[in-house]
Image: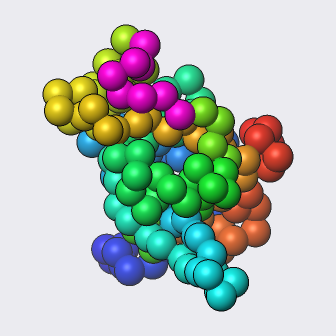
Amino acid sequence: MTPNPQVAPGPRPREQRLADTLAMLSSPVRDVWVATASTAPDGTPVPYLVPLSLAWIDGRIVLALEATSRTGRNLFATGTARLSLGATRDVVMIDAVLERSVRVAEAPPELAEGYAAQADWDPRPGGEHDVYLVLRPHRVQAWREVDELAGRTLMRDGEWL
């Protein structure tokens, strides 16, 4: 009897989820959905969602984008973002806070070269209005199926569990 490929193999132990999450974050050419929000003049929240390339450098998420983009403006205003990696059946959700921003033209080599190596593109040529945003993860959750919802939180308050 051959195994049914539609049947999930069961929940991963926490150690495996953490290893899979770190592998996903550090894999080359990784894109992430970045959700931010602003407030309309009438006080109504205005959510915004955009895909961006990321780099995982020294335990931080690094994004490169135009400083005046909606995502950039929202992050500068609120200091927070929610990020999502992977598919719906293998997702990593990250709540992060803006730790610092660095103009691309003024970035230290380890930041610029680390980003270019992992993201597979380099914003430095022609990026006079671009910034690197360094985000510190505050909460990280990972799950594949319903059986992994329990124990999905891998980081809380910036500390791995």
Q: Quadrant of residue 99?
A: top right
- At horizontal 65% and vertical 88% (from top left) the residue drawn is 42
Q: Is residue 161 left or right of residue 154?
A: right
- At horizontal 46% and vertical 59% (from top left) the residue drawn is 71
Q: Is residue 52 above or below residue 61?
A: below
Q: Nearer the viewer, residue 51 or 141?
A: 51
Q: Is residue 81 above or below residue 101?
A: below
Q: Position of residue 40 (x, y in %)?
A: 59, 80
Quadrant of the image containing the N terminus:
bottom left
Q: Position of residue 96 (x, y in %)?
A: 64, 50
Instruction: Report the residue that reaches farthest toward the top.
Output: 109
Q: Is residue 18 above or below residue 59?
A: below
Magenta stretch holds residue 102: yes
- At horizontal 27% and vertical 42% (from top left) the residue drawn is 29
Give the residues drawn in magenta, as a range: 101-108
Q: Is residue 94 visible?
A: no
Magenta stretch holds residue 79: no
Picture colour scheme: rainbow
Q: Position of residue 72 (x, y in %)?
A: 47, 52
Instruction: Report the residue that reaches farthest toward the left.
Output: 125
Q: Nearer the viewer, residue 112 or 118?
A: 112
Q: Tag count in the figure?
A: 0
Q: Is residue 105 above or below residue 83?
A: above
- At horizontal 52% and vertical 66% (from top left) the residue drawn is 35
Q: Is residue 134 visible?
A: yes
Quadrant of the image containing the C terminus:
top right
Q: Quadrant of residue 95?
A: bottom right
